Amino acid sequence: MNLPNPTPETVISLQDVDKYFGDFQALKKINLSVAKGERIVICGPSGSGKSTLIRCINRLEQHNSGKIIVDGNELTDQVKDIDAVRREVGMVFQNFNLFPHLTIVNNLMLAPRLVRNTSTEEARKQAMELLERVRIPEQANKYPSQLSGGQQQRVAIARALCMNPAIMLFDEPTSALDPEMINEVLEVMTDLAKEGMTMICVTHEMGFARSVADTVVFMDAGEIVERNTPEEFFNHPQQQRTQNFLKQILSH
Amino acid sequence: MNFDFALIMTSIPQLLEGIGLTFQLWFLSAILGLLLAIALMLMRISGKWFLYVPAMVYIYIFRGTPILVQIFIIYYGLPQVEFIRESFMWSILREPFGCGILALTLNTGAYVSEILRGGVLGVPKGLGEAAAALGISKVQRFIYITAPLAIRLSLPAYSNDVISLMKSTALVSTITLLDMMGIARIIVSETYAPYEIFISLMIIYLILTWTTQKIFALLERRMNRHTIQ
Ligand SMILES: Nc1ncnc2c1ncn2[C@@H]1O[C@H](COP(=O)(O)OP(=O)(O)OP(=O)(O)O)[C@@H](O)[C@H]1O
Ligand SMILES: [Mg+2]
């Protein structure tokens, strides 16, 4: 596959990030930097802190210590306008989280209209273009409950793209889907990667990781245990914990 | 026992002379109570103790005591307080109608605020997160995502409260108001026919309840059309 190369410019940087839930430490001294256009896949066992990590990047969770810099803005309590940072960072959730009371096209139009003051016509035009891109323009006037899981997740991706984000975060976008719907979502994500989108994707789809990722990160117990190119990661895992994990998921 | 069916029919038009007052008490306190409920609910979910503690105490008191007692305290008790007699509120509290509206509003506000809070808490957290992740501000998330969904979730319980408020309006006949219940009591004292009169009254209240239920059912169907496959 022909994927564009990441540029050396760093768009996300985490330095010694710790995150606690009460006494429980969910992230331990996380260091990670993401270059513009880089595609990172994060994997690891359940409860290892993958979701927590990417949720810290758009501050759905607040880290307790360390530094997170996104697109030049450090995320702190003092960040006056966290909403401004969030506009640059799209997020796709495991459970789609489409707004159930709005039609598909209105799901896509809401944020541009509220946040960017885009006119209705302009927002609609852009929404329809994005629905074309995720290959479901014909569903525009339905409600989310009338769509299949795979279609809903593609709408969720289109919704995130409506804000023209520089970075996309995916939290297990295919794990709530029936097997026959996984590919349609992965295809849309692969298209995005080809267009040079900076992506951080939590997923256990190893085929996707191999073909699309520049870097695979393995987490366990709140730590980054290993990071490498997909080739090295899958063929020559360095750490015992990585080897055990790969053995487990590849045996399925 | 002599049961006078004709009296049931003839008393209904007389009772209906009070329906205007019943409607006034009902609609006015429903609207004011809803506004109060929204304020209380926002205080309750604010996360600030100096807002949610007073709201909780208020709700506890008004849900934990009989509405009749609340009506009596407002009607008989408040006029004793000098500073109230000297304030602008006196023009309202001097009249039994004002006292009735106030009591019903304060009472229904407490119940409805808890219904609305249940609705807000029932909105899946992920939807607010999805909106937050799009850069939509906290206030706009509440207005465009949480509120519309919370209203849909609250509607069944809210319709029960509206009906229960309608029935509570009958209690203000105890403070001299001539709503349908007040009129019924007068007719009974003149005719000595409590069964017939109160059965007529029941019929009218049942029709009101039935109609209200139907209207809310229609509203629910309309609002929930997005969930119908
Ligand atoms: N809001 C929270 N309150 C308390 N503990 C939490 C909270 N969110 C996550 N945790 C805990 O933090 C740890 C990491 O959770 P996280 O959701 O990041 O794991 P994950 O790697 O995404 O797992 P999964 O593969 O199951 O999604 C878990 O032990 C979880 O129980
Ligand atoms: Mg997770």
Image (cartoon, coloured by chain):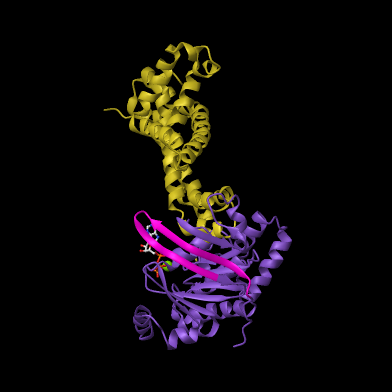
Residue A99 at least partly seen: no
Residue A68 at least partly seen: yes
Query: Which color is chain B depicted in?
Result: yellow
Query: Eyeballing the image, is B125 above or below A224?
Result: above
- Residue B131 position by quadrant: bottom right
Q: Is residue A21 magenta?
A: yes
- The answer to whether A251 appears left or right of A190 in the picture is left
**Number of marks:** 0
Judging depth in this view, the residue of B133 and A9 nearest the camera is A9
Judging depth in this view, the residue of B191 and B166 nearest the camera is B166
The quarter in which the C terminus of chain A is drawn is: bottom left
Q: Position of residue A220 (x, y in %)?
A: 38, 71
Query: Which color is chain A depicted in?
Result: purple
Q: Position of residue A136 (x, y in %)?
A: 61, 74
Q: Residue at coordinates 43% horizontally, 43% vertically from top-left? A: B115
The quarter in which the N terminus of chain A is drawn is: bottom right
Query: Eyeballing the image, is A8 above or below B203?
Result: below
Q: Is residue A186 magenta?
A: no
Q: What residue range appears in magenta?
A: A8-33
Judging depth in this view, the residue of A236 and B195 nearest the camera is A236
Query: Eyeballing the image, is B95 above or below A61?
Result: above
Query: Eyeballing the image, is A134 above or below A67?
Result: below
Q: Residue at coordinates 46% horizontally, 56% vertically from top-left? A: A65
